[in-house]
Amino acid sequence: MSLDSAPEIFDSSSFCPVTGGQHQPIYDVVRGQLVCSACGLVLEENIVDTGREWRSFSQDEEVEKSRVGGRVTSKVHDGGLHTEIGRARVKNERLRKIFSKLSAINRGARVRPQDRKLVSMLHIMNQEVSKLGLPETVKDTAGNIIRELLNKKLATRFSNHKILILATIYYAAKINGYPLPFQELMDKDGYPLDVEKERLWWEALNRVQLAMKSLNLRPKVSSINYVPQIASRLNLSQKVATKASELVTAVERRGLGSGKSKVSLAASAVYIMSVLFDEKKTQKEVASVIKLTEVSIRNRYREIIESFDIIVKL
């Protein structure tokens, strides 16, 4: 017998007249009956099961058997609420051509002229997030920010939409707790770094911040979030990563990280622990994996060892 708590749809009239409704009834899923948990009296029977009539044992089966659409998402322009005309499984060549033509017309009708820019930006965003191996939550957040950029006309008169999209991904990842080194993203658009490109990057970040403010979104990343990523890229042990995380936590508690680059603070802590645990990496090696300069690592490194009286023998 499969017994569950009584569904909320049953009102007080379903309570047992023998016990006075003092005991919660039990729903027998197999028999479709509502039974008193105290005396066993059947209160209702022949209850219709409103659940699905099929079972699945894998994610592929779930998708194949399900007859509903996906969840509402911001990563596509219509929120995922649309109708798709698939390829017809018919032998008749004429019917196959008709279904193919209907499918093409349907795809064209999905995108209104005013949504073309949104579709283009979302398409690039989805590609870049997938390349970076970030989760779907980042896509949803980035999709909301891109919509706000277009609604507030913050994307107008911006010459390089690729940079604007990467800046959106940078903040969307931070909002969801997946930090990305800023300098690493700056090199992803395929153009060499120069004064003009750097100016575009800072302008893009400012525009994205304005959109985030309208949406009341704030980054949730601290320096400690960068430690595992840096340690992994340097092939350091878990012991080094753990102790570097502890050092970063101690530094932030003292307020030494206020106003400083979070990634450089994390990198400096990893560098110090790699030396102390005899897995030494040079400042140049640490800086190269996160696209920072050695000067940034060196400055944070000096501040940490002076504040905590750490003796590092190089």
Image: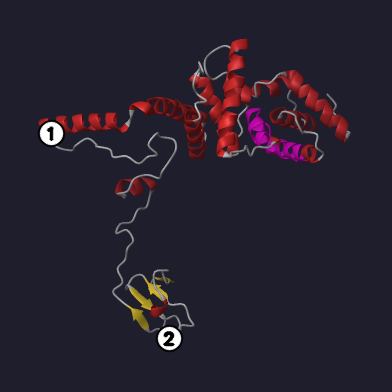
Q: Which quarter shows the N terminus?
A: bottom left
In-front residue for pair 206/222 = 206
Is residue 125 visible in the rendered image? The answer is yes
Identify the residue shown where x is 12% and y is 34%.
95
Where 62 sits versus 254, above or below? below
Where 147 sits versus 190, above or below? below
x and y, in percent, of residue 29 in the image: 36, 70
Q: Residues within 10 Å of mark 2 (few under 14, many from 20)?
A: few
SS at mark 1 in the image: helix
Residue type at numbered disc 1: Leu
Q: Quadrant of residue 15?
A: bottom left
Numbered mark located on residue 11 in the image: none
SS at mark 2 in the image: loop
Is residue 311 visible in the rendered image? The answer is no
Where 224 sits versus 303, above or below? below
Numbered mark located on residue 39 in the image: 2
Q: Which residue is mark 1?
A: 95
Identify the residue shown where x is 12% and y is 30%.
93
Q: Residues within 10 Å of mark 1 (few under 14, many from 20)?
A: few
Ranked by sequence position, the earlier of labels 2 and 1 is 2
Residue type at numbered disc 2: Cys
The reply to whether callout 2 and callout 1 are in contact (CB within 8 Å) is no
Q: Which residues are magenta?
A: 224-249
x and y, in percent, of residue 33 in the image: 34, 75
